[in-house]
Amino acid sequence: MTKKAAIYARVSTDDQADKGYSLPSQLDGCRQYIDQLGYSIVAEFKEDNSGAIPVTDRPQGKRLAEMVKFREVDAVVVHQVDRLSRDIVDLLATVRNWLRAGVEVYALDVGKIESELDIVLVIKGWQGSDERKKIRERSMRGKRAKARAGRVIGSRAPYGYDHIRDENGKIVNFEPLEDEAKIVQLIYKWYVYGDESGQRLAAGRIAKRLSEMHIPTPGETNPGYHRTRGKGMWHAYTVLSIIERETYAGIWRFGVRIGPTRNQRPKEEWIEIEVPALVDRETWEIAQELKGQNKIFSRRNKKYNYLLSGLIRCVCGRAMSGEFFSDHQYYTCSWRNNHHVHLEERTCKARSVRADAIDADVWESILDLFGDLEKLEMQLRIAQQEELAALDPKLEELNAIQAMIAQTEVDAEEIGQALKRATGLVAKSLEQNMNEVNQRYDALCKRQETLQTELNVTQLTDDTIQDLIEFAQDVFVGIENADFHTKRRNLEMLKVRVEVNNGMFKIDSLAGQISGEIRKLPKANRYSGGSGGGGVTNSHSRGRGLPGFRFLARQFQHRA
């Protein structure tokens, strides 16, 4: 039978254009090579991604790895070794796993790869890995040198500014945009000193005022941002991002974050660049102090616990947040908090849900699940296997790396013994081999540590399952009066997610799915200006309706 081959082609923005690495040229070369082998092409994977990202973390690379795992292909062909990966450890681990799965691996610049430690493959792999590092190092050196010279490095101009460019079109600094600069100054004035009546405005009220004035938002004036709201609709988060940005006080910083991550570099590595200030330093510092006080006040002002906080969503897909009004706790779709109801067409008309109703419904549904311990453990074990299956690529890579570490230790021992007896040119060659082995060993150990850390974050461990089963046993013998923290801990361990839709609830958890109707509770006191939650009585109600006695007592006192 004719063997089945898959082609994997990859480009990125680094160096493909001037090296003939375009996707069509890669595909054409691979097709001709496969035709010479006499194989048939069953799949072609085209990727626009960095070679520094592991193969199984790329969308098309992951699909190819799955085909290899299930032996849907007999061979994989790439144009160049570095098209597969520019990370030496990922390259060697991937090739090792594919070869041991019985799949042939070909690269047009190497030919058929017989082993992950094939000397040509290793050399090409190190070259690709080193070239990636050198490209990044050269790029960062150049950027840092420009920053130290007082030049702003190419980036989006913050709201309120435009770029100043030199005669070659390179970005040099920022210059204020008069109309936008006035809006920035107005935001700081309202936040720090107050409006025309002298009353300080919070970020939400500032956003509301700007929206009422139909001021274009930063997303509208700076193309490239995806917007889901109408024109001129400001968000409190946008206002806060302007308030906390030190650029408006005249300081722009380069090198704050490490690559695309949110991790920050040490402050001594930051480079400060002076830019035109839109507000004075004193005003900016007062704004930061007020912002910090508001954050502390917000934490202290949290009087109520919401069992499903962060676990409950509206049918529209948005999160629901806890609110207290009309003497009751509610969950409300975040649409209302994040939009200006009187200015925008309401896309979600879902009503608020009484927290004491839905909390009780969800918890009692979970207790019902605990009634069948055998079924509960079976569901948890299935969920555990699904969680582990999602980590299979990392586990396979870890196994491959551990095997290569063991082989590298053997290689080091053999070279060390040979080096004792060697002299002259042979000794020099062995020393070069030893350097390569040392580099390989260090890289493998570093990746092993990273993978072990990532694999250890699995939440549904054997200990977690045992804790849930033991808790279920306690419930089964009558311990149902769990406190808030016990309930919350178990909902999180079960990965409970709740969706609310027009008086109905749906629970997704590791232990299965449950649907039901939200119990109906007495309406809130109309004299406090509120309206109650909706829904109908749940079929497995236990001790419901007690809040009604308090309601009737208030009514009686009012009439008296």
Image (tube, rainbow, N blue to C red):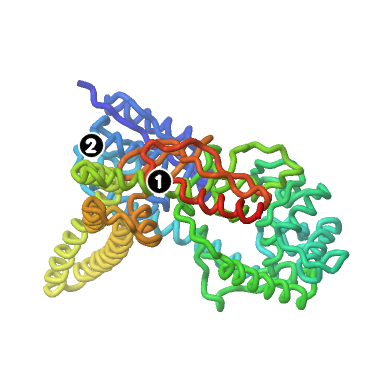
Query: In the image, which disc is placed on residue 103?
Result: 2
List x then y, in percent, for residue 72: 26, 30
Disc 1 residue type (three-letter): Val
Query: In the image, which disc is placed on residue 480?
Result: none
Q: Residues within 10 Å of mark 2 (few under 14, many from 20)?
A: many
Q: Is residue 383 in sight in this rendering?
A: yes
Residue closest to the eye, 41 or 450: 450
174 on left or right of 358: right
155 on left or right of 120: right
Residue 368, compared with residue 177, is above or below; it is above
**Which is more foreground, mark 1 or mark 2?**
1
Residue displayed at 72% across by 47% down: 340
* Location of residue 139 by image quarter: bottom right
List x then y, in percent, for residue 119: 25, 53
Is the C-beta separation of discs 1 and 2 under 8 Å? no
Instruction: Indicate which disc, 1 or 2, sits on the residue closer to the N terminus.
Output: 2
Residue closest to the eye, 37 or 52: 52
Label 1 and label 2: CA atoms lie apart by 49 Å
Disc 2 residue type (three-letter): Val
Split into 4 quadrants, where in the image is the C terminus?
A: bottom right
List x then y, in percent, for residue 312: 48, 47
142 on left or right of 503: right
* Location of residue 146 by image quarter: bottom right
Q: Which residue is mark 1?
A: 362
Q: Secondary structure at mark 1?
A: helix
List x then y, in percent, for residue 80: 38, 43
Residue 544, compared with residue 164, is above or below; it is above
Q: Secondary structure at mark 2?
A: loop
Q: Residues within 10 Å of mark 1 (few under 14, many from 20)?
A: many
Residue displayed at 51% across by 51% down: 549
Residue closest to the eye, 425 or 393: 393
